[in-house]
Structures are given as C-alpha cells and as structure tokens.
C-alpha cells in the first residue's frame, strides 16, 4: 500500500461532469489499496471571475484581503469534489490550508510554505478517509490566510508529498505529459516517459508551461517523483525524477522555443577592462535580468557588447542605457525584437560534445543564420530570426528524435 | 467611546453599490469615535446559488461538506466589504468564524455557539482596526467548519456583542424597524421606538420575520440592547431591550397574524380522566407541536377536544390520530385549515385586564366570530376565519393604536 498525492488543476474540475471524472480517478486509486491525498485548484474560471468582482470594489485592495477572498475559490472546489466522492460512496474529508497544517510566510499573494504539520491529515488517513486539501493557500504565524501565488497548487501538492513521504505526486492537467517539443509546433514531438528534474527546470523556464519551476525545484530538493498526466486521457504520463533510467538512449529531453526575448547591442565600446562590468552593473541596479551575453573580439580599440533581456524590460533598459551613454562610452544602441531563442535541453549533454554540433548542422542545412549562442551543462541555446523559429524547431527535432 | 456591533444581512450587501453604502455606515460609526465590529452575511442570492450548485453534484451531500462550502459565502462577502472600507481609507481587517474565535457544537448546518474567544478581535480593536467577522459560521472542537443555521448571522452578532460587552448591537436589514403590525396589511401601523425582549419573542414567533427568536433570546439572556434598523433609510430603528421606558403609555407592542395554523377537532371523546393525556402524548411522541388547546365542557358522557398545529404537520397528525382512533376513543375527526391566529402582544398586558376585552370588542363590532381563544402573560390570541384576518387586524389595531 502506497501513499499517493494527486493534484488536479482548475480545468480538470471546471464543471460537474469533470468533477465526477476526477472523483472516479481518485476513488480508483483509493480502491487499489492506496492512501490518497488530493490537492485541488479553484474551478475553471472562478479565480478570474473573483478577481474581476474584487476589482469592481477596489482595484487596489490589500493583498491580505485579496488572499481571504481568493482562498474561497479552492475551498468551494474542494468541498464540491468531496461531495462528488461521497456520492460515489467513499469516505472523504476536505481540509482548508489551515486545517491541513500548511504554515507559510506572511508575503500575502506570494507566500512560501514554511512547514506543514501533517498530524490532521495523518489522522484522517488512519481513519481510511480520502483527504482533499485546498491548493494555493495556507496561514501565516498571525493565523491570517495567505495564498502561494503562481504555481501555488502544484507547490502545495509537492510540499504535502514531501511532508507525508508520499511515494508519488501526480500532477493532473490538460496535457498528457512532457513532450520533446511543443506538439502544436512539432507534429512528430514525442511524449517522454521520464525526464530528469534539471531538464524539466530548463524546459519550464524556456516556456514549456506544464509545471511551474517552483514545484519542480521542491520535488528535486525532497526527491519526490512527480508524474505529469492528463485527467482526461487516463494514460500514463511523464515522470520527473532524479535519474532517468534510459539515459544511454536519450541524450536530449526536448527542444524549446522562447519568444520573450529582446537583443540589445552596444557598439563602439572602448576595448579596456571594466567596460562590460559598468553595463551589467547598471542593468542589475535597475532589476533587469540579462540572459545571453556576447562580446565581440576587439577591432582596433573598440568592441561591441550584445545581450538579451525579457520584452517587459525593453523600455526601461533602453532608457537607463541611453541616460548613461557617456559614462558607459558606447557609440550606438541597437534594439532587435525580431529574435527568438531555441534551446536543446538534456542532462546527457555534458558527456556528449556532439549535441551542439548536431544542432548547428541542422540549422546550417536549413540555411538558418545563428545570431548568438549560449551553452550550459544541460542546454544549448541559439538566437535566430523569429520567422525561422518553427522551421528551426522542426529540423532540430528531426535530427535528434527521428534518429531513434 | 463605545463598542458597537453592526450586522448587515445579505440584501444590504447584494452588489458593489450596496457594499459601499454599508461601508459608509460603518466608517461613519468609526469616525464618531466608536470601536466597530461588523458581522456580515453572504451577498444577496449567493447562498441560494451555492445550494443549487452543490445539489447538482450531490443532493445528499454530508452536512459537514455543505458547511465547508457554504461558509465561503460569508468569507467572500466579508473580504469584499473590507476592500470597500480600505478604499474609503480606513483601517480594517476581516476574520472568518475560526479566526474570530467562534467555537460551536458539532451539529453541522445547525450548530450552536459554545463560546467565543475574543482575544484576536480585541487585539485588532486595540490596533484601531474596524473588524469584519463572517456571520453564520464557527468551528467545532475538531477544527471543522460549522454553520449556525437559520438566523445564524444575527446570532453571531449578538454573541459577539455579549462576548465583547458591546453597548449596542445593531441589526441592519431591509425594514426600518419593528412595527405595531405588518405595514403591508395595516396602513396605520406605527414604528415602535422600543419593544421589550418578551414582546419581540412573541412577535417573531407570530411571523414578524424581522429578527430570529434565537438572537432575541440570546440578547435577553445577556442584556444586549438590540437595534433593528434599515441600511437604506439611515433613520433610527427600534430598540429591543429589557424595560421599555414609555410603558405607561403603551400597553400593546403589536398585532400579529399567523396563518400557518390548522385546527383539528376530535368529537365524542368519553368524558373521563386521561383522555386528553392520551391524545397529546401521542402527538408529542410523533414530534408534532400543539399550540392552542380547547376542551369543551362535557355534554352527557362525552366531550370535544380541539387544538391547533402547524400546516406542515397536518397529514402526519391526521394519520397517527386515525391510526389510534380506537385507543383514543373519539367519534369524528374534523380538520379545518381556513383559520388564522391573530394576536395582541404587550408586556403591559398582565397589569391591564382590559386588553382582552378591548380586542374582543373590536371583533364584535366588526361581527367577526372567534373560534378559539388563548391568553398568556403577554399576549391574547384568537382563531378566526381566514377571510376576516386583515379586517380583524385593522379593527384591533385601530382600537389600540389610534386611541393615542
């Protein structure tokens, strides 16, 4: 008998029919002899509807009161799910964040879980109850209700799995697993059976959007096996874990595209020590994160520095750079927002220098020009023109995955 | 500086505009130098909408899960009200039942308040916060959420007023006070400035529907002055209290009509001891409450027994009485549901034997026949034909209130 934590997102419980579908998944897991702890999000568009209603009253409401209000979304969802499970004839109890012992920091709207007191949940499991816990919420040391911010319900599920030493944490969503590339772009994309935590982290930050990094990081820290699967298809999903068993076969986990990229180039900077430092110190002081950095080899006594930032930071970056033009000592500032970043991710990469070469070969054969390159232990990223993005994904994916 | 508890019903906070209207009443009370604790119900039709949604999932859901679900109605309402008060620029905090220290019995859906731990509320008042508390809810000793059933939010308000030793508990509703009769029937009905607890209890049970008896009983027990007033009109309401100051002037608080009445008559019962006992013991065993009882003077060796019950108990009463016809020994059973009960209520009545006579005189002048009479220390009730009910209310009200 195992203890399994199952998390269901808002689309999985959006209406009565889907609530019963989820209730069946839960009760089948329970009937197979497992202890089951369920984490549930607010139904469908509930949270958006609530945000709109609150904005009508006060668009600048305190985060404390917004948390009190929004926490009801999960509380309603969990009690309705419990009622559905009752109707199927199974013993069940629902618990809010505070009832489930979820203690958080006091950062309303983006609290972090400090600890979980699992006594109440353990008692209910001992009584053979299925336990439904409201995702996304907890209480701080003042006994005020807090919410966990983006990815909050996934985080609740992984934290409960860690606290209860669950053998598996299943994240049910509307996709049936992690793919080698976005299936909407790459028709041949393959569903992965397994993926290492680190690759998942890279894929999530590159826009795979299935799991929030925060929950993957926590799963890695506490060695929780995470399964991403669909509540609609009822097929096995993808397991995110420490070591992938078929490592020899698979060097690359996936190909990802990130179009939230702006490249800024500063030309004619004097080729002397400390120039690059001044640029990036300035950006850092203004809370602008820099991703890929490329510095040209000096020509004469000047050089160029290029780097990428998020689209949201573009105006601010241009403003502060121009305001400090004299101090930084550059000639011209060029902004390019027609670029995307395409990355190949794989924990096996470090032992296999051919990965980058294979990627570049694919792009060369397709005559796609590479603007910038960045490599790390588990990924190779290239910056290319937006218009070639999907084609680049196709050719790179074919090179790596259709060899198999 | 006084501590005032204000309670607002669902219609008072039904939409954003009304929420701000209520927020203004609260902040004006606060600005006048008072500590303010507010109890709020779920918005408008929220609870009905939620009941319908839960019934779709499971019409026989456990009361425990229904309580978890329904408690969200007040939690959402209180946080929206807090946001409105924030927008007006006042310090405010909302507290759920458990955060406000409201401990109840475990009777889900109809829990009773066992005690209130007011420490948290006191702390927030010390910090000069306006405190908004969710009505209708608490937690039991297992830390499960409970709801208080009908009249629950009024009960929360009075219990908080008692626990915090408030100087006044204001119940804001959609009527502007307690009237000497239903203003929809009696155009001349006068709003009372004050009314004793006992009269209010009689009027509530007779169908005045403004305050639930449970909250009036609690107010009486803890000597809390209750004010019933409208959140729309902003006029002084009616104060429910122990001793009414203008007692000499006013002998009668009000005239009430109750049409939830069925009379059952058993004829030809043997005129010997124990016959009446058998009838009412049988009804009591079947949980049928009997109101007025009338036993005729024996004629020969038989007598008749008549009594009134609620309409909802009619079929059950007829069934059990007929099933025991031989044992009870009656000849015929007559059911009459064309009757209403009209009552004159007034704490001064016991010192004023003329009240009943005045009432009967009014009915005699209007040629309305009286079927049954019942008197107590604070009321005189008569049973008359339904069709004369409004006319009876008019003539009795005129006799008592237009003398002034």
Image (cartoon, coloured by chain):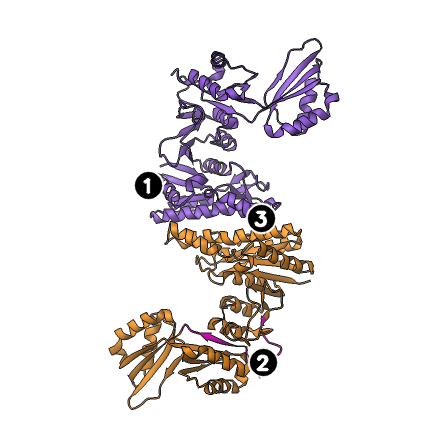
Chain colours: A orange, B purple
Query: In the drawing, does residue B230 fall left or right of residue B331?
Result: left
Query: In the drawing, does residue B87 fall left or right of residue A137?
Result: left
Q: Which mark is residue B31?
A: 1
Q: Which residue matches tag 3?
A: B56
Disc 1 is attached to a residue of which chain? Answer: B
- The picture places residue B141, in percent across and down from the top left corner, at 58, 45
- The picture places residue A303, in percent across and down from the top left corner, at 31, 86
**Residue at the outermost top position:** B300
Disc 2 secondary structure class? loop
What residue do we see at 59% from left, 20% from top?
Answer: B292
Q: Is residue B346 visible?
A: no
Q: How far apart are marks 2 and 3 (CA)?
A: 48 Å
Query: Marks 1 and 3: which is nearer the front?
Result: 3
Disc 3 secondary structure class? helix
Specify which label sits upstream in the sequence, 1 or 3: 1
Query: Marks 2 and 3: which is nearer the front?
Result: 3
- The picture places residue A403, in percent across and down from the top left corner, at 58, 84
């Amino acid at each position: 008998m195992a203890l399994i934590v199952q998390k269901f997102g808002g689309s999985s419980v959006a209406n009565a029919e889907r609530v019963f579908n989820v209730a069946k998944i839960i009760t089948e897991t329970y009937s197979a002899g497992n202890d089951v702890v369920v984490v549930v999000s607010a139904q469908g568009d509930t949270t958006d509807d609530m945000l709109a209603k609150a904005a009508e009253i006060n668009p600048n409401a305190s985060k404390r009161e917004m948390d009190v209000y929004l926490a009801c979304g999960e509380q309603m969802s969990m009690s309705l799910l419990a009622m559905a499970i009752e109707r199927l004839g199974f013993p069940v109890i629902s618990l809010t964040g505070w009832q489930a012992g979820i203690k958080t920091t006091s950062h309303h709207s983006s609290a972090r879980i400090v600890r979980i007191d699992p006594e109440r949940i353990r008692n209910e499991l001992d009584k053979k109850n299925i336990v439904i816990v409201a995702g996304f919420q907890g209480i701080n040391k003042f006994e005020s209700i807090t919410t966990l911010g983006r990815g909050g319900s996934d985080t609740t599920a992984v934290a409960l799995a860690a606290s209860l030493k669950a053998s598996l944490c299943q994240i049910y969503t509307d996709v049936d697993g992690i793919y080698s590339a976005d299936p909407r772009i790459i028709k041949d994309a393959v569903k992965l059976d397994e993926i290492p935590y680190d690759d998942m982290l890279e894929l999530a930050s590159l826009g795979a959007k299935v799991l929030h990094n925060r929950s993957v990081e926590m799963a890695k820290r506490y060695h929780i096996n995470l399964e991403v699967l669909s509540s609609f298809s009822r097929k096995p999903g993808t397991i995110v874990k420490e070591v992938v068993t078929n490592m020899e076969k698979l060097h690359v986990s996936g190909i990802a595209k990130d179009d939230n990229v702006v490249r800024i180039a500063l030309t004619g900077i004097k080729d002397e020590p400390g120039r690059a430092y001044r640029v990036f110190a300035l950006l850092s002081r203004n809370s602008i994160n820099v991703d890929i950095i490329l510095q040209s080899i000096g020509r004469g006594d000047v050089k160029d520095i290029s780097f990428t930032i998020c689209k949201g930071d573009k105006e601010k970056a241009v403003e502060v750079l121009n305001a400090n033009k004299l101090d930084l000592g550059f000639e011209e500032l060029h902004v390019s927002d027609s670029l995307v970043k395409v990355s190949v991710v794989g924990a096996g990469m470090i032992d296999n220098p051919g990965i980058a070469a294979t990627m570049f070969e694919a792009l060369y054969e397709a005559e796609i020009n590479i603007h910038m390159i960045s490599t790390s232990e588990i990924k190779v990223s290239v910056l290319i023109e937006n218009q070639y993005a999907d084609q680049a994904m196709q050719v790179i994916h074919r090179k790596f995955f259709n060899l198999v």
